[in-house]
Image: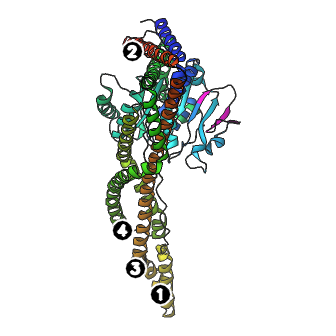
Amino acid sequence: MGGITAESTFSDALRVLFQYEHLAGHAARQTLRQLDADARTNLFVISVLGEFKRGKSTLINALLGQDLLPRDVTPMTAAICVLRYAPDPVLIVHWSDGTEETKSLEASSLQQFTAAADFDPDTVDYLEVGVNSEILKNGFVLVDTPGVDDLNHHRSEIACRFVPRSDAIIFVLSVASPVRKSEMEFLDTTILEAGLDHILFVANFADTADEDIETILTQISRRLTPVLGTRQAKVIPLSASVGLQAAMSGDSERQSSSGLAALRQALMELAGEVSRAEVRHRRLLHRALGCTKMFVSDVQQEIALADRDIQSLQNDLATIEAAIASKHERRARINPWLEDRRAEILAMVQKSLRHFQEELAGSVIETVEDYKGTDFKDFIENKVPRYINKACKTWIEQHVGQINTLLNTLDRRLIAALGAEFEAHVPQLRSHGGLILDSVDMVGLSAEDVSTAPQRAGLLAGGAAAALLVLHASLFVPIIGMAAFPFLVKGMTEFQLRSAKEKIRQPLRDALDQTLTKFEERVLGAVSADIDTLRRTAEDRYDMLMTELRDRVASHIQEKALSQEKTKGKMAELQNALQNLSASAERIAEALSSPVKG
């Protein structure tokens, strides 16, 4: 099928959709308007996705050749950043209330929108960043997203909302943990479900790989096969941090060895005139098909309402209004079930946490007891807290996918219940969220400084020498003093260290208990808060669907009361709309089943 045919198929589909826009619900109309707006641009949208701490912002900075987006060892991206070409740098904040604010673009101006900053992410829709960068001149738009396992519902929802609007995806993985279950689930249910088949997989941190990189790439490809099927996974090994340094210094050799040059080449191949046209046509067709199916569902519901007599509709309206009014009773029925699910999820998370806490506490105490150095104070006050902090972060990384799966399962059960009740397509309530937390700071400890043992030993040795001088043994004083000094140091150090360990033993246990209890409370609190958000979203979605249904039923009652002839005309219009929309969906599906040549 030629590109012109693909374009004409899309144009025809859009025309049919706008023809029946007045018959569709709010969600379908909003989807149509977004599709139309995106079709009018010649931009090629590439979303950079992946779980948190995968180095997505560093990767984008490397592609830009500028250290622009905030990056750190902790998760930084808290707002969607849409990067486009602009001759002069600019930052436009798109607030959630629909207003915009233009600011000067500096690295510091983006810091206020990071996960570490004190700002409410619910107030920001997304950030539009204009950058003078060579790669963006090709018509690329790069989208930097928070981790797809972000517990903040608003950020996750916006991140996933950009997926259907994307033309291609860079999915960032880590060589340290190739393709987790949560990553495969997100790939299957969000990316592939949206019809995206142009995906570049990046295995980041390649310079830190413990084994042969080719072996790791083979493992990644093998793990992706069950999800991708016959699709070929293109996996590019990359060290984003090395690539960024090389790009900023203009070192082409290091850009090549880091994998940055290969990633740029893959993007440039995708940006070719023919390839880009092909990808965009297919993406727009796929989105048009999804939108058309939403319209068909809405029109079918309208036909079902139009087919009922006025008495039945009045009974329906009374039932709907009673359901809207009995919000508290409905919650009273749902809440016990949801609380049981909450208890199940929290119990599973807590069981894992308790096992982790016992192992960590035992490991810390054993490490302290085995300590042999002289800088015990620094060890207790600085190194032990860092060790605990790192262990907590490791636990989060290892278990975030499992928690994510539990919460997504709960989401799907609520969606299924809503969909069955309203016989309608219900978008996901919780966008593949997960856990994004920094570990807690350890309760402060103060230990004895045993590093003073050599000085004290020196004083003692000096005292012994003075006594010998009084006895006229001056010839042997230097020899005796030097010989005794190492033994004095060793003995005093061991004595002071034993004493310091004895004094710190109980405070250490208390501090560990308080710190790990606080960590457990933070994790369980975050999971519980996400379930609360999910419940509120489900309730809001139910109210919205019920209100929309009430308005539709009331409209049909009014039409039937005014004119029987008008009702017949309405039914004829609906039947005609359903026929035309279904035919349009078939044409789009046929176009998508044939290879698009551009």
Quick check: 401 left or right of 157?
A: left
The residue that label 2 is drawn on is 589
- Of the numbered discs 4 and 3, the one sitting upstream in the chain is 4
Residue at figure coordinates x 42%, y 13% from the top left: 579
Considering every residue shown, the one lying at the far bottom of the view is: 471
Mark nearer the viewer, 3 or 1 = 3
Q: Is residue 162 magenta?
A: no
Q: Amino acid at mark 4?
A: Ile
Graded by Cα atoms within 10 Å as few (under 14), some (14 to 19) or many (20 or more), the crowding at tag 4 reads: some
Image location of residue 67, percent across then percent down: 59, 37
Disc ID at residue 365: 4
- Of the numbered discs 2 and 1, the one sitting upstream in the chain is 1
Graded by Cα atoms within 10 Å as few (under 14), some (14 to 19) or many (20 or more), the crowding at tag 3 reads: few
The residue that label 1 is drawn on is 464
Q: Which residues are magenta?
A: 83-103
Query: From mark 2 to mark 3, how far is it between C-alphas?
Result: 81 Å
Query: From mark 4 to mark 3, how far is it between C-alphas?
Result: 19 Å
Mark nearer the viewer, 2 or 1 = 2
Graded by Cα atoms within 10 Å as few (under 14), some (14 to 19) or many (20 or more), the crowding at tag 1 reads: some
